[in-house]
Image (cartoon, rainbow, N blue to C red):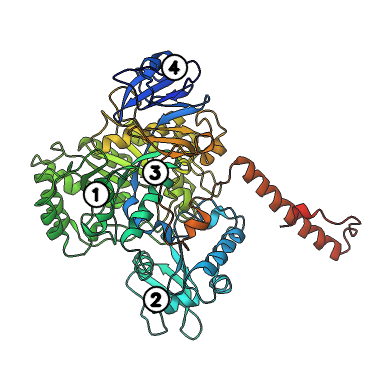
Amino acid sequence: MPVGGLTPRSVEDAADVVVRNARIHTGDARRPRAGALAVRDGVITVVGEDADVAPVIGPSTTVVDALGRRVVPGLNDAHLHVIRGGLNYVLELRWDGVRSLRQALAMLREQAARTPKGQWVRVVGGWSAEQFAERRLPTPAELNEAAPDTPVFVLHLYQSAVLNRAALKAAGFTARTPDPKGGQIVRGRGGEPNGMLLAAPSALILYSTLAKAPALEGEDRRTSTRHFLRELNRFGLTSAIDAAGGFQNFPENYGTVTELARDGQLSLRIAYHLFPQTAGQELDDLTRWIGTVRPGDGDAWLRLNGAGENLTWAAADFENFAEPRPELGDYEGEFEQAVRLLMEHGWGFRLHATYDETIRRDLAVFEKLAAEGLFPAGNRWLFDHAETVSPDSLDRIAALGGSLSVQNRLSFQGEVFERRYGPGAAAEAPPIRAMLGRGLTVAAGTDATRVSSYNPWVALHWLVSGRTVGGRALRPAQNRVDRATALAMYTTAGAALTGEQDVKGVLRPGCYGDLAVLTDDYFTVPEQDIPHIESVLTVVGGRIVHAAAEYEGLDEELPPVSPAWSPVARFGGYQASGAGARQAELLGQVVAESELHRHWRVERGLAAERQQPFDPCFVL
């Protein structure tokens, strides 16, 4: 149909999708701004203004009027546990974005009533006590009150988990259960577990307990994964690099995304890594994988990117900032064998390393192999996290051809980090400007879903503002980046980590047709409102995979959430609260606190009783 004077015509090279009347940030230095673009066969064919796309509008072209909205290249989370997250998404109650513990417990209570016998209510990542108005965790007693009979497991960062009595029973914890290595079962006076599990410092006690909860099977896994990918599309994500992780076995746990890719049902491009699961068997796993698959295997939607984020378990430090930095034993011998094996066979890798003490030891191994010509040897490799990496280590990473991937873990753990290491260390954690100043590729992500939220705009806000989800400013201006740089870390830099920088991360002819039309202009919205940005239209390879607001119904249909009692079916995923909603919520909290204070003053004769009743509109 004619749109704004653009009339369809019969043309052989008609576009599949045209976006017009837009404010497009292309990410392309040669043409940074545009007003329209066209996509055909999954690839951008035209970038320009409305007049430039008019000749390729045919009768079957979907013409999207962006109504002057900001359009950006599709976002790419460079460290996301998307495969594992998809297999569990519909089972999890999300507290991401919830602003009060009272609201969180109300959601939990309602979900417990909806959950059938034998199933658990689980809250797994995406939140921090610092985001709540109450600034605290729920207690085991509160969980018992909210769900007296349904097992409840609430994971808080890498630090702890809170369980109710029913979950302790279902997980088999008793007074006779010994503390596992690196973990603590908190006990009451009689020795019975009280519902608190502590990572001390290893989170294995938390994850192994979570693994005892029932898992999805069959078609429910596919449905869960598709709904998780659609949730990511909701925020403008079009690509992610899966960092593998514990309890993610290859090839078993990769089967669902492989099937969806085969059937053309992925709505997010995934580059994945392989992570040895069993200590002592890492070299056997790596050897077997090298003999059967190679980095680059797959296609533009699903492809192998290398090994990691662990290569050997002994070389992994822990990111529980509530505990002292772990002292690792001697790991270099087996670690060197693993790295040598990968580099000799053309495999890149990514490596989990929180502390500079670990990074320095790893670099010493790399430098030894570099003397033999094995670094960088054309293989892509990087460090993940690197919160306390030193200037000297950054120089060594650059000399060895490495890259970095940083995540907003301190959005959620920043206050804990600052209490342990001080404001000076927190100001440089991680030293993003120092990384970029050395010309290193620095990509950004979330490390969701077990700690951080998968919402990329929370991470972009952290990069730009240096603030936690609780509002605390940690990183000063000299260690923050501007909005364009942050967006490049979420687009072009991520593409470079998978070798796709020539086709992904920018909007120019010949690149993938991956883009997001945003609710608010990322470049002009007040800084505090960046976390509230979403996409109203997300396009991946010319397919409309998410549509909201004026575009509702343009996206591909999904099967209903299954099982029907899923928390996602009732509450959805990330709990959005726009700037106006947040302001109203804060006002409500202030009014409630003022009324409590007034009662306190009246009881002490310091104020007169109010003659008019308190406005019930403000009663919480």
Q: In this view, does 246 lie above or below 367?
A: below
The one of 143 and 235 positioned closer to us in this rendering: 235
Which of disc 1 and disc 3 is earlier in sequence?
1
Q: In this view, does 546 lie above or below 601?
A: above
Q: Say which mark, if any, is on residue 430.
A: 3
- Residue 59 image offset from top left, x and y in percent: 39, 23
Numbered badge on residue 304: none
> Is there CB contact under 8 Å for labels 1 and 4?
no
Residue 228: x and y in percent read 40, 50
Which residue is found at the position 47% from the left and 39% from the top?
Answer: 553
The answer to whether residue 517 is above or below residue 105 is: above
Mark 4: give few (<14), some (14-19) or many (20+) Cα within 10 Å: few
Residue reaching furthest to the top: 51
Residue 173 higher or lower than 608, as above or below: below
Q: Which residue is drawn at 43% across and 47% down?
A: 231
Q: Is residue 60 left or right of residue 599?
A: left
Circle 1 is placed at which residue position? 273
How many angstroms separate mark 1 from mark 2 (CA)?
A: 30 Å
Q: Can residue 429 be seen in this view?
A: no
Observer-side mark, 4 or 2, equals 4
Calculate the distance from the C-alpha at mark 4 to the C-alpha at mark 2: 64 Å
Label 3 Cα neighbours within 10 Å, binned few <14 / some 14-19 / many ≥20? many
Q: Look at mark 4 in the image and give the residue it sits on.
A: 7
- Separation of residues labelled 2 and 3 (CA atoms): 37 Å
Residue type (three-letter) at the residue carrying disc 2: Ala
